[in-house]
Image (tube, rainbow, N blue to C red):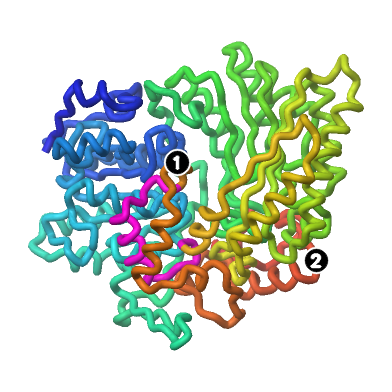
Amino acid sequence: MKIKISDRILESVEKPSRYTGNEWNSIHKDLDNVLIRFAFCFPDVYEIGMSHLGMRILYHVLNEREDTFCERVFAPWIDTEHKMRENNIPLFTLETHSSVESFDFIGFTLQYEMSYTNIINMLDLSGIPVQKSERTKEHPFVCAGGPCAYNAEPLADFIDFFMLGEGEEIINEVMDVYVSWKGSLEDRQSFLEKISNIEGVYVPEFYNVEYNNDGTIKAITPKEDRYPNKIRKRIIENLDEVSFPEKIIVPFTDIVHNRIMLELFRGCIRGCRFCQAGYIYRPVRERTPEKLLNLAKKLQESTGYEEISLVSLSTSDYSHLRDLCIGLMDEMEAKRVNLSLPSLRVDSFSMELMEKAQKVRKSGLTFAPEAGSQRLRDVINKGVTEEDLLNSASIAFAGGWSTVKLYFMIGLPTETMEDIDGIAELSKKVVDVYMKTPKDKRGKGLNIGVSTSSFVPKPFTPFQWEAQDSIEMLKEKQQHLKEKIKSKYIKYSWHDPNLSFLEAVLARGDRRLGKVLYTAFKKGCKFDSWGEHFKFDSWMEAFDQCGIDPYFYANRKRDFDEIFPWDHIDVGVTKKFLKRENERAYSGETTPNCRVKCTGCGAAVFNGGICK
């Protein structure tokens, strides 16, 4: 069913360009020649979803298939949803303005736990049953992937199946099975049966979860022998050979990352003990500089963008970064295209790299020391020193930069108030470095932004056993730091501890949280990561109404032998290795990065014995 949104409605909502479609390089197909229609849903607003590289990649991969049409769907903003419900307009796609209820698949990307109520709201707005148990063969299959899918349990009531790991290959394999199933007279269950043995596919309903009397998990087991005991994530071995878009959609409106994003590599060599991405994306696999230069040229020609961002978990760990930057600047400088280098580590910064990267125009610089003391940086295995940061700041200020952002985390395991004091002291030392820089070299208007997030213990990290600080303790630490920062050049901002608390609950939650999510949705919880719409009291009412203790998930330290809700998922990194890293954290021992010495995490064995 094609949806007609009147000009009257579009004129009455904020940013109508979020809903019109027809952007430059968007894809359109003849529906009479399409066998599969896939609605790719991002559970947040257009500006955020269109900035996500994974969505751009899979939109391209699916639309390369002649038999498949992938269309985009975003969460309508509050005002637009109100108009849609008032006028009985269901959730629709941008490409054809079709109701997603008429599609074969509704696929969500799970980037952040606090988007879960948006997923439920989007399903409700689409008109299909929110609970998977109520869907029939006439309804679309609802699937999901992304980093949060590695603990799929809180969403098990709503999602038919999950695709774990990198999606370029697995999603095509699922579509191939669907083509043969669609022409059959078999029921909905038979399709799920067929895909359950595709590596990386997880169908929650094929697994039983048993609980102990104390609420912990006793066992997670497949209901029948034909389902795998462990679901292995999918990885792409050769990034040069995998499909990457040479054309990307250019929005009519400004978005968060309105630029070309070049993915240098996947994985991370560092092993910061709090960082989930650093473990679930292992092992490291790089694209060659030749491939990247070719992609950059084609993307710039097809979009006209004036900025290229080099993206990865730690950009400066790309082994060909110098050659790539030189090649990109030689190609792009005459076109006035700027080069952005996010995720730089403070121990590998150079004046030469800065000058080449932002020769066209300077932007702010971001460093992430994460902790205020060397002791705590060793605990989290950050691998940088105060000297590294101050040297980098000195180089930056001498090169004309005057805006620097410093990211820290509070509530880390073993943290004390002295570590919090260290954040203020280190920030002041950065100001001092600027003041010592000759006036003829430094830029004007020093601006140091200090931001703290609250530690959230995440699955598949060495800190997955740790307790999160209580909300009260996090607030106390934030207030303490605020009082310690005296400089007028430093602006301090922090994350809402209530939001971090709920993130921890959902990150480590199990299937019992499904009823809480649904209850919170019914109480109006959505866009929870947007401060003005976050309803913490409604969330707590939902927990109470469902008889679920959220502190059991967030503020409880686990024993090493406890079974996690994600223990039947295999990301390649072994639990034995994560335990060892946890023990090393408490003894203050650092672990060298993967290029210095293999630490035996398991990723090499998982990838056929190869780590690059």
Q: Would you say 497 lies left or right of 389 here?
A: left
User: What element does badge 1 sit on?
Assistant: helix
Report if residue 447 lies within the magenta region.
no
Q: Main secondary structure of the magenta part?
A: helix
Question: Horizontally, is 428 left or right of 177 in the view?
Answer: right
In percent of width and height, residue 318 lies at 66, 41
Is residue 318 visible to us here?
no
What span is colored magenta in the figure?
506-528
**Residue annotated with mark 2:** 589
Residue 455 percent across, percent down from the top left: 62, 57
Quadrant in the picture for the N terminus: top left
Label 2 sits on a secondary structure element that is: loop
Residue type at numbered disc 2: Glu
Could you tell me how far apart the alpha carbons at marks 2 and 1 are, in whole angstroms?
Answer: 42 Å
Crowding near pointer 2: few (<14 within 10 Å), some, many (20+)? some
Q: Identify the residue shown where x is 23% and y is 62%.
A: 131
Q: Residue at x 61, y 34 (%)?
A: 289
Q: Residue at x 31, y 43 (%)?
A: 40
**Residue type at the position of mark 1:** Glu
Horizontal arrangement in the rendering, residue 381 relative to residue 375 (left or right): left
Q: Nearer the viewer, residue 585 or 271?
A: 585
Magenta span has 509?
yes
Picture quarter containing residue 586? bottom right
Q: Is label 2 or label 1 in front? A: 1
Mark 1 or mark 2, which is nearer the start of the sequence?
1
Q: Which residue is mark 1?
A: 532
